[in-house]
């Protein structure tokens, strides 16, 4: 079975109509205990072997040259990326694929993905939140 994550309601309705899969509202909420689907129902994440994430790229894009922010600043790009890492470490799939823009901080992202930077250093010791730590990176 597929698990799909989509925040936009019109995209959620398209996915729900056209694909037989569990639909979750936001990757940031997937590590909630218990996670809830787009309908608000408790829906545990079944075991899976492959994790594919295309996290938000807004804050990493070269189009934001004057306003680009780093992972730790917890803009939508950092927040969704850190939530994907949290899920990756929690569920431990055999394979993981991340996608983002060329201008994303890939070297630092790989340090999070491989565990060289501990998520707790950036997530106030527990869940990823939308509150900025203002940490330089």
Image: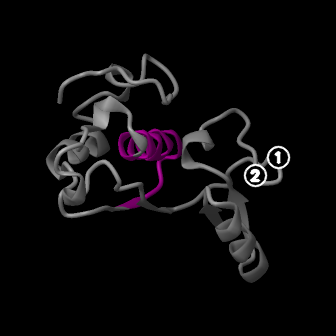
Residue where numbered disc 2 is placed: 37
> For numbered disc 2, what is the local secondary structure?
loop
Magenta-colored span: 77-97
Dot 1 crowding, Cα within 10 Å, few <14, some 14–19, many 20+:
few
Q: Nearer the viewer, residue 54 or 1?
A: 54
Q: Nearer the viewer, residue 117 or 24?
A: 24
Determine which of the numbered discs, if any, sits on residue 14 in the image.
none
| View extreme (front): residue | 66
What secondary structure characterizes most of the magenta part?
helix
User: Is residue 1 shown to the viewer in this render?
Assistant: no
Position in image of residue 24 (x %, y %): 68, 55
**Residue visible at 83% across and 53% down?**
39
| View extreme (bottom): residue | 18
Q: Is residue 106 above or below residue 13?
A: above
Count the numbered circles shown. 2
Q: How is the image coloured?
A: one colour
Quarter of the image that includes the N terminus: bottom right
Judged left or right of residue 106, residue 48 is: right
**Residue visible at 57% across and 60% down?**
48
**Residue visible at 38% across and 38% down?**
75
Task: Tell me whether circle 1 and circle 2 mark residues in contact (CB < 8 Å).
Answer: yes
Position in image of residue 83 (x %, y %): 47, 41
Judged left or right of residue 117, residue 39 is: right
Determine which of the numbered discs, if any, sits on residue 40 in the image.
1
Quadrant of residue 70 in the image?
top left
User: Is residue 31 shown to the viewer in this render?
Assistant: yes
Q: Is residue 12 above or below residue 27?
A: below
> For numbered disc 1, what is the local secondary structure?
loop
Quadrant of residue 33 in the image?
top right
Confirm whether the magenta stretch covers residue 88: yes
Q: Nearer the viewer, residue 110 or 102?
A: 102
Judged left or right of residue 75, residue 102 is: left
């Amino acid at each position: 079975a597929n698990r799909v994550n989509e925040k936009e309601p019109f995209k959620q309705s398209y996915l729900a109509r056209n694909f037989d899969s569990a639909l979750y509202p936001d990757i940031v909420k997937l590590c909630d205990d218990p996670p809830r689907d787009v309908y608000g129902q408790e829906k545990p994440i079944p075991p899976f072997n492959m994790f594919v994430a295309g996290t938000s790229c807004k804050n990493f894009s070269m189009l934001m040259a004057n306003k680009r922010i780093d992972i730790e600043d917890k803009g939508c790009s950092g927040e969704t990326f850190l939530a994907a890492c949290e899920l990756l470490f929690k569920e431990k799939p055999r394979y993981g694929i991340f996608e983002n823009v060329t201008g994303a901080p890939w070297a630092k992202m790989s340090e999070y993905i491989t565990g060289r930077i501990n998520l707790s250093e950036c997530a106030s010791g527990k869940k990823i939140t939308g509150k900025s730590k203002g940490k330089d990176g």
